[in-house]
Amino acid sequence: MRRSKALSALLLLAAGTSAAADRGYVAYTAPGNVFTCEIPKGWQAFGSETPFGSSVHVLGPAEEKGAWRAAIHVHFFQKSKPGFVPFDAMLKRERTPDVTTHRQATVVTRWRVSRGSGRRFDVTETRLLPPDILPAKPVVLHHYYAMVPAGDGYFVIKLSSTQEDYQRHRDDFDHLLSTFLITGY
Amino acid sequence: MAPGADQVFNNTQTPLRDKDFTLLSQNGYQLQGDGTIRPPGSTQPLRVSDVPLVLDELTSRQRLQAMMELNVIFNKYGTKNLPDDALEDVRRIGRQNWPVLPEQVRSDLKSYFSVKEVEEMNAGVGPMRVPQTWLPLEAPGPYEVADSTSSDVNPYLGAAQAVPAAAGSAPAPSAAAQVQPAAAPAPQAAPVAAQAAPIPAAATVAAQIEPAVAATQVAPVPTAPPAPAPSAPVAQISGAATAAVSAVAAAVAPTVTPAAQPAPAVKAAAAAQAAVPAQAPSGYTFKTSAAEPARLQAVGAVGTQPAAAPAAPTAPAAPQPVEYPETPPETFKQFLAQAPYGRQAQDLLAMISDHAAPEARKTALGEIARYTPLVFVDSRRAGRGTRAAIVKLREEGGPTGQYLVALSPGPLMVARKSLFSRNKQFLLPDDPEYYKSLGVPAPALQAAGASPDANREEEVTERGPARVFEDGSARLEYGLEQMAGDLLREITFLDPVLRGLPADAYGNALLARTRQFLFYRRLQKDTGKSPALSADALASYREWQDRPQDDLDFVVQALAAPVSAAVLPDLSGGKESRAAWRKLHDRSLLDEAGLTPAGEADSQQPADAAVTASPEAEAALLPQAKSLGELSAAGKQWLEEETRFRAEAQADEKK
């Protein structure tokens, strides 16, 4: 019995790995060569300047019958920008519960990202989707978070999807973090 | 008396024509959430028997006012060799009021228009179609940007996307031109047209956002002398109507001096109209508001510039963005008092004037003064917009028209119980036509007006304050402050379209959102209390303040989803694929809400390039993704205003 369970687990693991490998990843370099990483094949990335630094959005598959789209986001916060929020304060803000959206966060774990010590946690919240178009309904969203210090600033890395689909993106987020490399800021 | 004539009129059950609705709204009548209509200053709703009389009365007033304005112009300048601005005023008044003017007056005015324009205006004399506010499935979504071949000009697009569809076709009559403020030419249209032949070639107007508007701006050489000089002085008309006319006349021609003789036809018609009683059978008094948009001449609005600047007649000039002047609060108040807005819209605009951030205020007020987009509070016209929608009105015989900002006072809501979780709320459109387009029956909910006499209670639901009816259905109630923010957002969206600026749905969305939230923040600061927002609006507002990166992510993901398809639209497939996505989404959601016949929902997902990951799709998406990374003018403006706000907020915190 124990052997069959172990065998099943191995098979499942192999199947998961195979699925991830089938899906495939492609290398991505952010504008300005700020970081590099591998993103799922087929996902579309674009980056732009933001008030707090710069951001890259990587758009994935549609979810919730077309009302939402899974995505990876990488935000770089520069200390020189006005309104800069320090790392610890932002970590606290990200994890602060909110009654209106039922926002909740898991505990923080340490995670090695780009040879540094990142903080990783998950957040769930309920939002109205689509936000501006009827008909609409509240949908539970799930966000994988990782925050990585970088010099005076830091990165906030996030994979956001619906709660219904978040499990199948876990490998994508793990792979992203394992290949994420800060190359300049 | 016809059966039911004494019943209270209900617009939900018997929708008014758009033209009639506009007329009522411009005169201060207010559409209530339950579909009834209240006269200005009255709590008694209109009865069925009142409606035709009221409409007749208001139409008569519009006719009278138009003729009096013509009278003022002809008194001042005569009828021949009018100065450019006076000629433009005559043409504008003619265009705006053509369907209501007496035949003789129309005949006299024909000489100021080209034959084609007259034909077009005569075609527009028929009733207006009800606008397709619910965004039918085959039409582009409110954020859709890629369909440059669509015949509809998307409010979220600039001129560049609008041109291809229209450039090859003949210009059509424009309702926009009929309702726009005096001498407010479409960007670049008038200078070109002034030197051109009466009917411009398609190439001449190709750079315009609305070729139809450009066409109506053409200043032809009058082919026959207009009616002789007028004779009846303005003072012959007494009462409130005269006051309104005088006010408008003062706005149109501040230096006018009473004189001389009106055209015989004008005089006769004016005399006939003067005898129309100002009291309706139901006992209320009509509000005498200017049907004509007032202008901000005092502050030098660009809309008052004459349309005769010389320009090369062949090649279209590059779009020159209109610059709006600063508008002092008092001047805007005066403008509002004469502008064609109902009381609720006036209140919202006044709130924007008082509390919007300087940049947002300048744009919003400038746009309102120059282009005077219609503003209605009407959930049916808001269609699929959760809080608001921009609608381009259509007319019989012409594809383009005036823009309308329809604000929803609150959508319908139904809740469904779930075994393992909380009640799930579904927000639904109001318009029966929407359900018809989906092939499902409109839900017979009390909140939708199915039982006008049903009891209701005010409750604070999970989604915000609402009126909850006996059958469990509800209607969310958005507060005035929230609606003012929504109006500011829509006006910001609409601005680049009206000014002919390059399209950037993403940048415009970010800028509009920031201005809306800045408005709430300043309102909070000015009044000392939090703005009354629905739960979802409040969540977004807080997120924007505390975690702007998460707010940005939320916007990106929502706009890139197939239902919106404003960011990287081709990621959701082609136009047909996006329509299929919308249909799938809507039917699935209605099915989940128990509003479709069992088992009808389609579960097959349309194309998604992020899943198929084909090289062709990737190659097509690459340029789109690249352009998103380069900030447009709207994007740069967003960045500038956001950065300034973050710096100010930080300084405030330090204090």
Image: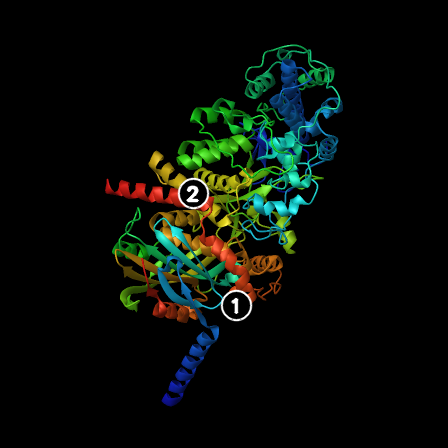
Q: Is B644 on the left or on the right of B393, as rendered?
A: left
- Whether residue B572 sits left or right of residue B331 in the image: it is right
Q: Is residue A100 visible?
A: no
Residue found at x 53% / y 55%? B565
Amino acid at pointer 2: Gln
- Residue B368 in percent (x, y) is at 52, 33
Residue B193 visible in the snapshot: yes
Q: Give coordinates of residue B533: x percent, y percent.
A: 42, 44
Q: Nearer the viewer, residue B113 or B49?
A: B113
Residue drawn at x 68%, y 34% is: B5
Q: Nearer the viewer, residue B388 or B419?
A: B388
Residue contact at pointers 1 and 2, CB within 8 angstroms? no
Q: Is residue B337 above or below residue B271?
A: below
Question: Label for residue B613?
Answer: 1
Q: Residues within 10 Å of mark 2 (few under 14, many from 20)?
A: some
| Chain ID at mark 1 | B
State which quadrant residue B87 falls in: top right
Identify the mark at residue B637; answer none if there is no mark: 2
Three-letter amino acid code of the residue under disc 1? Ala
Farthest residue, direction left: B655
Q: Identify the chain of the residue marked 2, using the numbered disc in the image.
A: B
Cα separation between marks 1 and 2: 34 Å
Structural crowding at the residue carrying mark 1, measured as other residues with C-alpha within 10 Å and reported as few (<14), some (14–19) or many (≥20): some
Q: Quadrant of residue B81?
A: top right
Is tag 1's residue or tag 2's residue first in the polypeptide sequence? 1
Q: Are marks 1 and 2 on the same chain?
A: yes
Residue located at (44% from left, 44% from top): B511
